[in-house]
Image (spheres, rainbow, N blue to C red):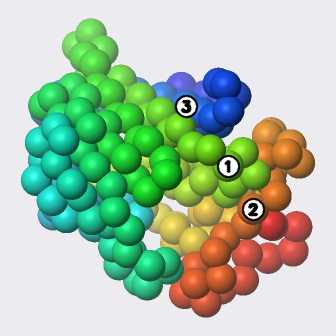
Amino acid sequence: MTDDEEFGSLARVGDASVLRFRRRLCYAPRQVWEALTEDGHLAAWFPTSIEGERAAGAPLRFTFRQGEGDPFEGEMRIFEPPSVMELRWADDVLRFELEPDDDRGCLLSLTVTFPEQGKAARDAAGWHVCLERLGYVVEHALPPWDPSDRWREVHAGYLARLGPEASTVGPPEAWQRAHGAAGSGDQ
């Protein structure tokens, strides 16, 4: 994929905003599935812990590891190893899908559906960085950048790509306290 393809896309579907990301990974779906779902791997790339049973219909609780926000509730909507995990993450719905990609590994798709269009650029940058970090987790490597710095870098691209309607909500104050102010030009 080119750098341009790494960026997520935004669409409006009824009253909801939908971000879509696709990543080709040179690993078998089972390896990527472990990184997507197992606690030991989640801590390295997912923004919160996921407390609860990995089973469709199970209630979940999410906690930010560095106190960037209050804990919140959700639900495991679909859990079909090693291909689909869909969960309600507060008001958002996250759907991770893995499909084999010939002999080269797999294709990971993330669809994020949410009600507040104004947070699209902020959240797109966040999920973009999370997916990059996931790639490093699968490779058993550390990213060569700080996640907060990387978010600022890709956020600028999403501000330009998604426009002003998708850029009215910036990082929460707790995130800025934990990671530093978003910087000039960031919402």
Q: Residue furthest toward the top?
A: 102
Left or right: 175, with 60 as reference point: right
Dot placed on the residue nearer the N-terminal end, 2 or 3:
3
Left or right: 110, with 75 as reference point: right
Badges 1 and 2: C-beta atoms under 8 Å apart?
yes
Left or right: 182, with 150 as reference point: right
The amino acid type found where label 3 is placed reads Arg
Foreground mark, 3 or 1?
A: 1
Looking at the image, residue 89 lies above or below residue 106 = below
Return the residue at label 1: 116
3D distance between C-alphas at marks 3 and 1: 15 Å
Dot placed on the residue nearer the N-terminal end, 1 or 2:
1
Is residue 138 visible to us here?
no
Q: Residues within 10 Å of mark 3 (few under 14, many from 20)?
A: some
Badges 2 and 3: C-beta atoms under 8 Å apart?
no
SS for dot 1:
loop
